[in-house]
Image (cartoon, rainbow, N blue to C red):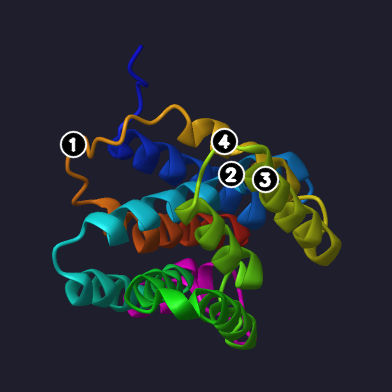
Amino acid sequence: MVPPLTNYHIKLLAAALMVVDHVGVIFFPELPILRVIGRFSFPLFAWLLVQGEQYTHHMPRYLLRLIAWGFISHPVYLWAFEISEPDLNILFSLALGALCLRGRRQYPQWELPIWVGGGVLAELSHASYGFYGIGAIALIRTYKLTALWWLFWILLHLFTELQWGYNQLPAVLSPLIFHLTNGERGAKARWFYLFYPAHLLILGLIHLQIQQPTG
């Protein structure tokens, strides 16, 4: 039986889960279940990044697109989440992950230092998901349903639990979704990058409207 999910389906699922996560952050911080559900989104974005870096015909353009949309989205990101301290949105994290992916492809003998350096840089730059994000991308690149792979994947999530709490821990099950993919690209998703700043803008405007006094 052919697995039913194309990468387009994964994009739809990742986008929907991200909205759930952000609705939880902005509107219902007292309902942690929304964060737990929504945190499945990052491993799916990491899966798409690994696929994209592997099959892109123009890596500089692919990387520039991530960085450009990261800058476009950043003011909306800071405003929607009411962030005042230095913090980089997920698109910058994915761009850093893409650099690590391409770096280890061109310099395989330096793979471990590249991933460790990427994780350290993610932490120092306050990129979303920090070391976990880069670690997840590194492991997803080598995704195999073997006991050793699962061991490293589980250890990454246990380490993250010690750092962040339990929100990210259930995402340890996300590789079960990867197992349902068929490796096909599926329909084009020209809306995908625009969706990130657009949904944050919409959620932020709704929140602003709710906060305004009615009298």
- How many angstroms separate mark 2 from mark 4 (CA)? 18 Å
How dense is the environment of label 3, judged by Cα within 10 Å: few (below 14), some, or many (20 and up)?
Answer: few
How dense is the environment of label 4, judged by Cα within 10 Å: few (below 14), some, or many (20 and up)?
Answer: few
Q: Is residue 185 above or below residue 25?
A: above
- How many angstroms separate mark 4 from mark 3 (CA)? 9 Å
Which residue is depicted at the point 61% across and 77% down? 83
Provide the residue designation for mark 3: 148
Q: Is residue 131 above or below residue 124?
A: above
Furthest residue in direction front, as rendered: 109
- Which badge, 2 or 3, comes first in the chain's sequence? 2
Provide the residue designation for mark 2: 40
Asked whether 12 or 76 is in front, the reply is: 12
For discs 3 and 1, the disc positioned in front in the rendered view: 3
Determine the secondary structure under disc 1: loop
> Do tag 2 and tag 4 residues touch (Cβ < 8 Å)?
no
> Do tag 3 and tag 1 residues touch (Cβ < 8 Å)?
no
Determine the secondary structure under disc 4: loop
Q: Amino acid at mark 3?
A: Leu
Q: Amino acid at mark 2?
A: Phe
